[in-house]
Amino acid sequence: AAELRFWKHKDRDYVSLGHGNLNADNAYFWRDAQGALDCGIFDFGGFSVSCVPHNIWWMFNMAEIDQIIANLDDYIVGFIDMYVRAGGPRLDAGVVKMMILITAMQNCMTMVAAIPNSLKMCPAKEFATIKDRHDPRIAGNIDGKSTLRSCIHVLYGTMRLFEELNVAAVIDQWIQEVFVTEWSQAPKSDAIISSADGRTATA
């Protein structure tokens, strides 16, 4: 929603120049002459000024969700401390976490929209006999692309977040604290939320 995009970018402390898709496959590693591990990054197509916690989620979204759920708070504290050491402002850990989790749900909705395409790559009838994500029907490159396994991975991870970190309550918190209290807006009705164009549905 436009309101969420505005909220994530309105405070300059939470906005910076950064990589927009820093998953592990966009990093490379080597050891120098002394054997010390070093790394670099590539794929700068999404490199831009944007919301920092938004980009943090886009670093997390292809990781193993178990370790994200178990360590998210520690990752946030570690990032905030390092951000300060590098000259950035000290961010509020609660705001950072809220932004990360809301971004995860936005990512989830993108993947929901991709389900019809995924079912072209692996028909629904096949899923009855797929036991885990390592099945080659969904784990390999289908039609030369990683789209299917990426979609499944993100849907699984974001649904785990929604259930185990109670993201519904986080969204309700944002509505009450930001949309209603800070911005003095009335919560959107179910009709507005479910209508295609964001306006009140008419008969």
Image (cartoon, rainbow, N blue to C red):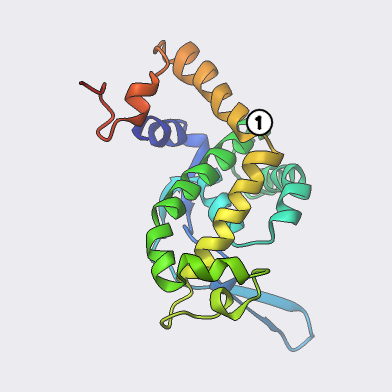
- Please name the residue shown 47% across and 57% down the image: 20
- Please name the residue shown 61% across and 55% down the image: 156
As drawn, 162 above or below 145: above
For the residue pair 40 and 7, the one nearer the viewer reads as 7
Residue 123 shown left or right of residue 140 in the figure = left
As drawn, 97 above or below 133: above
The N terminus sits in image quarter: top left
- Please name the residue shown 69% across and 49% down the image: 82
Q: Residues within 10 Å of mark 1 (few under 14, many from 20)?
A: few
Q: Check disc 1 and give the amino acid type.
A: Gly
Q: Position of residue 93 (x, y in %)?
A: 67, 34
As drawn, 156 above or below 98: below
Q: Secondary structure at mark 1?
A: helix
Q: Position of residue 6 (x, y in %)?
A: 38, 32
For the residue pair 113 and 68, the one nearer the viewer reads as 113
Residue 46 shown left or right of residue 100 in the figure = left
As drawn, 120 above or below 192: below
The C terminus sits in image quarter: top left
Residue 64 shown left or right of residue 193 in the figure = right
Q: Quadrant of residue 41?
A: bottom right
Residue that badge 1 annotates: 94
- Please name the residue shown 62% across and 71% down the image: 129
